[in-house]
Each structure stands twice: as C-alpha cells, then as structure tokens.
Image (tube, grey):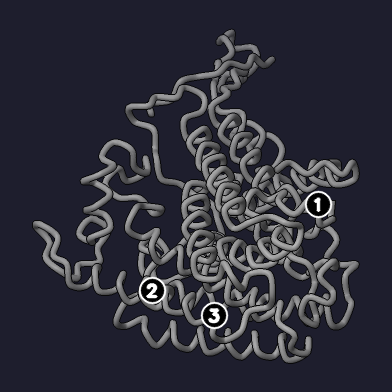
Amino acid sequence: RLSISLTDPADSNTAASASDSGTEATSAPAVPSGDAAGAARLVSLDVFRGLTIAAMILVNNPGSWSHIYWPLQHAPWHGWTPTDLVFPFFLFIVGVAMVFSFAARLRRGATPAQLARHVLWRSAVIFAVGLFLHGFPYFRLATIRIPGVLQRIAVCYLCAALIVLAARRRSLARPATARDAAPIAAVIFVLLVGYWALMTFVPVPGYGAGNLTPQGNLAAYIDRALLSGHLWSQTRTWDPEGLLSTLPAIATVLIGVLVGDWIRSARAPQLKAYGLFFAGGAFLFLGRLLDPFFPINKNLWTSSYVILTGGFAMVLLAGLYWLVELRGWRRWAKPFVVFGTNALFVFALSGLVAKSAGLIKVTFERAPACPPDCGAPAVLRQISLHSYIYNRFFAPLASPENASLLFAVCFVLLFLALNWLLYRRRIFIK
C-alpha cells in the first residue's frame, strides 16, 4: 500500500535542426573535401555526441552511489577514470561543431554581429536552465549553487564563440588555413600556460603558492571568496565547475574548434582521419608527460587534463570518422545518432527526473519482524522513489554493483526511447 508525497530536504537530422543540442552541436555537415559537400552531415560527430550524452546520463544515475564499478566513478582527486573523459568530450564537440555551424549561417546570409547575438542568447538560456535544475523545486536563492555543468557549457561556449568570431570573422565562411588557426592556437597556449602559472605561483592565504589540495588551491580560494554559500553542496568550500578552472575549460572548446577546422579542410578524408589519430596520440603523450609537473585533475581542470582529454577526444573522433564516414558502417550507430539530437534537452530532463525521484517519498507498510500471528502492527517505512524502485525491482536481480549498473542502463534506455519518439516526429528542441 503506497502513498506518494514531496518532501523538503535539508538543503531531424537535417541542417535546419543544427542547434538541437543548445550549443550548435548538431550542425556539423560532412565535408570530405572543403565546402563542396557542405550540405552533407558529419554523422561521426552525431555519433560522438550521442555516445557522450548517453555516458553523461549513465554515470550520473546509478541505482546506488555505494555500489559503482570504478570506471563509472570520478577520480577522488589527482588522476583520471573513463568517467572523467565525458564532460570534456562534450565541450570538445561544441568546439568542433561550432566551426561548421558558423560557416553554414554565414553562407545563409548571417553577419558576425548576428552570430554574436545568437551566441549570447543561447548561452544565457543554457545558464538559466542549469540554475533552474539546481534550484528545483524550492529555489532558495540564498544558497543556490551557481556553478554547474550546464553553466560551464554556457560560459565556455560563449567565450570560445566570441574568441572565434573576433579572430576569424573574415575567414569563417571558408575552410581555415594555418594562418587562420594560429590565433586560436595562441589563445589555447595562453589559457593553459597562464592557468598553470596562476595555480603554481600565486600564493593562497594560509596555504602558500602551488598548493593543489582541495582546500588550498587558488581556484578553491577564489570560489570561496566570490561564491561563498553558492558552491557544490558536497563540499561548500570549492566547486568542480568553479570560476578560475573555467579558463582551461574554454581551451577544451577551442581545441575542438581547431579539430573542426581540420575536418572541414580540403584534405583527403584518409589524411583527416590519420592526422586526427596521430595528433591525438601526441596530446596523450604530452598530457602524461606534464602530469608530474601539473597533475591530471578533473576537479581543477588542470592544463595536463585538458591536453590528455583532448587527445582521447581526437583519437575517438578519428576512429568514428574512419568507421562511419570512410567505411560507411552506420547502422550500428543509429541509437547514438538519435541520442545526439535534442542532446542538452534530454540531459537536462534526465537531471530533472533524477532529482524528482530523489525528492518524492514513498511510504509503504512493512510486515513486522515477529511471526504473522504475533499481533504486532505493520511498520511504516518511507524512502525516496528512486530507492524504492531500485530496491524493489533491481536489487534482487544481481549483485549490488551489477544491479546498480542495470538501473543506470535502464535509465539511459528510458531517455533513448523518449528521444526516439521526438526524432521520429522530427521534434528538435532548440
């Protein structure tokens, strides 16, 4: 016998649907030889986006946070796991697709000023959605978390797009040359080296310079100074999507921009795939090489982390480009193409559903511990709807880790089904 209540806790695959993801991430056309094939789709990027969104939902929604296989957990501090690759992959995708989206809009008659206004509006909407998810359902403005995943996407998209528009406004409509790419590469270098210098040489009161502990690093100090009371609820003294660490995250988007320039060029498709693969390998080597000097750390978004994750993203995109664009093996990838449409909408909705399932309480009668004829009354128990579904339907099926993973997989499939309905009806929420 169940009763449900809300409790208060303590705290189209077409060019026209180019912006379904909220960050221009669905606008990339396949251009194997410059702009000649500008109307085609870069399906490998769609697949990459779908894989990334599915992974984001998977790792955010286990059945039990106490029973998770290590690849589906973030590294506690220094180091990395496969889960630590997911968020930078999405920012990388934003950068790749931005190149194609801007070029397509310019061909349709948009001006750089119109593009800038479009970017400002879209960034504001994404940021507002992130704040809404953090505030839902009670919206305590005095303690609402201001940084977050969607907020970082919005800020990085805004900054990277304005940098690209400023540096490339006269050359965005055509494939980029090495001279066109040089200013973007210079900004990446300045962001990564500058962030390392700030984190290494600027002293933090009470901790000194170069302290990279959770409490003692410069990024955490700035977060406490400027966003006190509005930080991640699990720490309240620092935020994994904080202010200073957004600088190297912008570099992640700009690395994607350079990759987009490479794919959009007039080079042979095979050369594009091989070039991406070898560049990715070089980034992986460099990221590991820099690790002893500036440790790979997702929470700090260190420069070595940007380089390492950029390398992984290039290698994965090269593999998908080879499979999907060159070999033509696309049937297996259809679910991920579908997942890549309405990407940020589905991600935000999954967060809203997960949060609601944690807030809604289920009250049920539980049999007494004594024999049925002992006369003891039934015991009333109250747990979250999430816990009730997991314990009732998933926990009995397998070991705790496998049951938790099965719950997460079913959660992903639920949103794949929803997205498939939208896709079949050609509904693309911008």
Q: Quadrant of residue 1?
A: top right
Which one is in front, 186 or 297?
186
Q: Is 216 situated left or right of 26 in this image?
A: left
Mark 1–mark 2 contact, CB under 8 Å? no
Q: Is 311 situated left or right of 99 in this image?
A: left
Q: Secondary structure at mark 1?
A: helix
* Residue at horizontal 34 percent and vertical 42 percent from the top: 231
Residue 35 visible in the shown view: yes
Residue 16 is marked as 1
Q: CA distance from mark 1 to mark 3?
A: 27 Å
Of labels 1 and 3, earlier in sequence is 1
Q: Position of residue 420 (x, y in %)?
A: 84, 46
Q: Quadrant of residue 175?
A: bottom right
Q: Secondary structure at mark 2?
A: helix
Of labels 3 and 2, earlier in sequence is 3
Residue type, mark 3 in image: Ala
Q: Is 349 situated left or right of 247 in this image?
A: right
Residue furthest out toward the left:
206
Of labels 1 and 2, earlier in sequence is 1
Residue 71 visible in the shown view: no
